Image: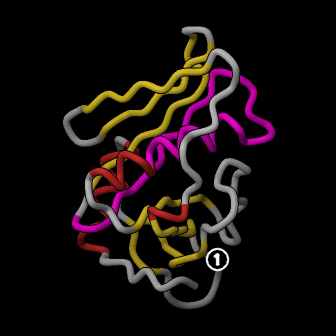
Amino acid sequence: MTDFEPRWDMITPLFAAISGEDHAYAPHEGPGSADATVLAIPTGDVPQPPKLPEGGGISEAPLEEYDVVELTIWGRPAAQGRIAFGDGVAAIGGFGFAADDADGRLGAAVVSALAEEAFLEGAEWLVTVIDGDPAAIPPYLAQGWTEAAKVSAR
């Protein structure tokens, strides 16, 4: 576990915003497996600046409930992620890949760009939710991410 203390009233709407779905998470209680795992990292612990592949570029687009960061390679979309902001925390997710990212390098660049945006907005922590218990942590969420909570969908 980590020093991050989830405030469910704040982060549940952030997760709903970036997923585009109207569902909520609650702390998992009782026996059995949880539906998902919340991971957290201090914003300043995410490696900076983003390591872009040759021909890579990052663009950011603020939308209504969340912002989108997109990584392009030679002008073509390769990876993207979403971020929503709360008080001292930012939730990231909605990751999508149009190019192969088996080694996690494209996703890591997107996470780094999202962390930079979170830092500029004053977020001390980044959180994300990964399906499963135990969660299969994707390679783009490199070192430093720790389990903050097990959650169940309501």
Relative height, residue 153 to residue 48 (above, below): below
Q: Nearer the viewer, residue 27 or 85?
A: 85
Residue depicted at 35% across the width and 55% down the height: 119
Relative height, residue 82 to residue 120 (above, below): above
Q: Is residue 72 magenta?
A: no
Which quadrant would the N terminus be assigned to in this image? bottom right
Give the residue furthest to the right: 103
Give the residue furthest to the bottom: 30
Residue depicted at 60% across the width and 67% down the height: 145
Q: Position of residue 98 (x, y in %)?
A: 63, 21
Residue stretch in magenta: 87-114
Q: Position of residue 88 (x, y in %)?
A: 27, 68
Q: Position of residue 147 (x, y in %)?
A: 59, 76
Residue 86 lies left or right of residue 68; in this view the side is: left
Q: Amino acid at mark 1?
A: Ser
* Quadrant position of residue 79: top right
Visual colour scheme: secondary structure
